[in-house]
Amino acid sequence: MAALTKQDLATIGSLLENDKPVRNHFSGYGRLHIDRQLPFLTVYRKPKDTADKGTHRLLLGEASYLILENLDDWHMQLNQLVGLIQKTQNTVFGGFLLLEIWARPDSELENEHPEFRIFAPKQNCPGILLERFESALLRISVNELEASVTTEYTDAVRPPSLEAIINTRIEPGSNFIHLGLEVKPIYRDSSNTLFPFELKELRHELNRALKRLYYEFTHIGTSHRPGHYHELGRRAITKSAHNSDKQLADISNKFDLILHVTPVNTPEAWARFKDSQFQRIPEFLYRARPVDPDLLKRQLYKIPLERIEDPTLAHIFSEKREELDRQISLIADRNTKRFVLGSRQLFGDVEPGLLASAEDILTNLSADSSMHFTSRERLSAEEFCNLAQYEIQQYREQDDSFDSKAVLRDDVSGLLVSQGNLLIGKDCRIHKARAAAVLAHEVGTHLLTYHNGRQQPFEELYTGMAGYEPMQEGLAVLSEYLVGKLDPARIRTLAARVMAVKYITDGADFVEAFSLLCNKYGFEPQSAFYITMRVYRGGGYTKDIVYLRGLSQVLEYLASGKELESLYLGKLSYEHLVFIQELKWRKVLKGPRLRPLFLDTPLIDEKLQKLGDGLTVLDLIEKT
């Protein structure tokens, strides 16, 4: 039976004419994927009698590609299929680019550097297009080895031993261009053993270079005018990507690391520590762990991320899986010596610049500069819960799907956000003067980004991208400045958390770290206890460095001229912002559903202008 029937061709032509996605699997022969109407097609044909492992995977992230793995009886049909695609897309755009990719013969592998050879027709191919394609390929590096590129002109663009896809002569002035790209297969050895890391990196880099080529071609040879080369990436998300995202989110939602490492007896531990004259290391108790780490990890690594064609999504989900692996290990390692090592893997150590910033803050802001409050100036847990519920209701009036809650708990000390809800310990007391800042921090940042992330097509945007904590906490602390309630005491506390992390990674015990905060930096014993407890809980939870680190990073981000509001799209990480921007250009992600209420307060434009001009952490302090 023929691999491609007349009915298949008619169906494909109809889908293209109506700007519908085409996704055909030709059983035993290959596959065709065209995301939407686009003026280009990337083709790979597997050579006969050759394994050619890995090469076809270089195309899988493209928005428009054809892969043929069995060429028997296909040449005439290939001509018909490509001719149909070219004719249909050319009608829409006034031009069409066909790019064929193949691997260089393995016998020519003499080094590990990525190398490319562009094959172009001798006539009717704009020199500027080839120059920009060459420049895009030269940006590629794999294992920090830079690429080299050469260009050859030929009468017929085709891989060795295969006929040209298009046999007809190109008429002068035609906007149809046929290019070839030979890739050195650095992703395998001579015995056809694949190197998955090299393949993944090359695929991601090449995907970006090809989008740059297609972007240049649209401006040179078509009527299409995309604003960015990422606009030419794929918009359709495959079922495998959606399923992988959901499975990762399901695992993430099965546990809350913060809850599992937060003591349930903090007030009692403080009382005993005080009774011991601050000499006996406190004993903390924790809630039972309702998950089996071994089973969670088995489930985690059953997720077939290798099936995700989109290299950007594959990278994002792969990093999330790695982070979940380490978080699950922390649950298993709670209260063991391994715990602090796993925590350092997640959050890193105190870098020299962060340490210098913390020391500078604690040196320049004396303990006397901190705000002092009487007990009458504090809100009870119930009073603050009412305020939080009112704040949540303000967001719910803008979007009735905002379903977060503020909940009083007797097994939580202080405030805690867990899976989109604000948990308030019944022993919690909030200074009236800081109530607005706490609401902006917890509700206007943490709950808001959780909600906005839930409106996106990927659940990772609300459970949190890998490494999202610095941006999340940096935005949350910045919100305190934006509502005018960031005081010296708060900044000193963030700096002290950094110092406590430095102490524990240097080997100090709880009593030693507590004493240093009291004696060297002038913290009151109860404040020093809670700072130390947060860092030493579970065996050494070093997350507390992300507050000051994240605040410094967000200040640098705004000082570079970038805007603030887009950062509330979900729970994002700095390392992934380039991917978030790409997905927005591709129309995969949309803007934030809600914006923080504090961005509509008086004088906010003046403060944002100052942030754009560049401020340090100390510049943010509101003198009171």
Image: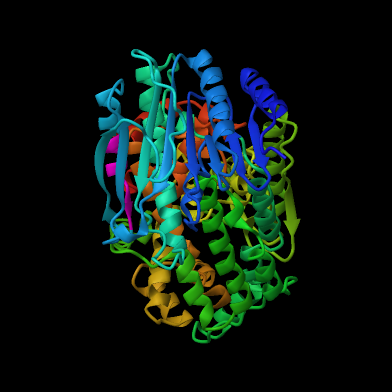
| Residue lying at 38% horizontally and 55% vertically, measured from the top left | 185
Q: Could you say which is closer to the camera, residue 70 or residue 93?
A: 70
- In the picture, residue 428 is in which quadrant? bottom right
**Foreground residue among 58 and 403:** 58
Instruction: Reply above or below: 522 against 226.
Output: below
Where is the C terminus found, in terms of image quarters?
A: top left
232 left or right, relative to 591: left
State the residue in front, 519 or 228.
Answer: 228
Residue at left offset 27%, top offset 43%: 138
- Residue 362 position, x and y percent, is 33, 61
Q: Is residue 514 above or below residue 461?
A: below
The type of colouring in the image is: rainbow
Q: Residue at x 48, y 23 (%)?
A: 39
Magenta extent: 133-142
Q: Nearer the viewer, residue 343 or 439?
A: 343
Q: Is residue 47 left or right of residue 620?
A: right
Measured as percent of width and height from the top left, residue 2 is found at 69, 37
259 left or right of 316?
A: right
User: Is 53 colored magenta in this rendering?
Assistant: no
The answer to whether residue 489 is seen in the rendering is no
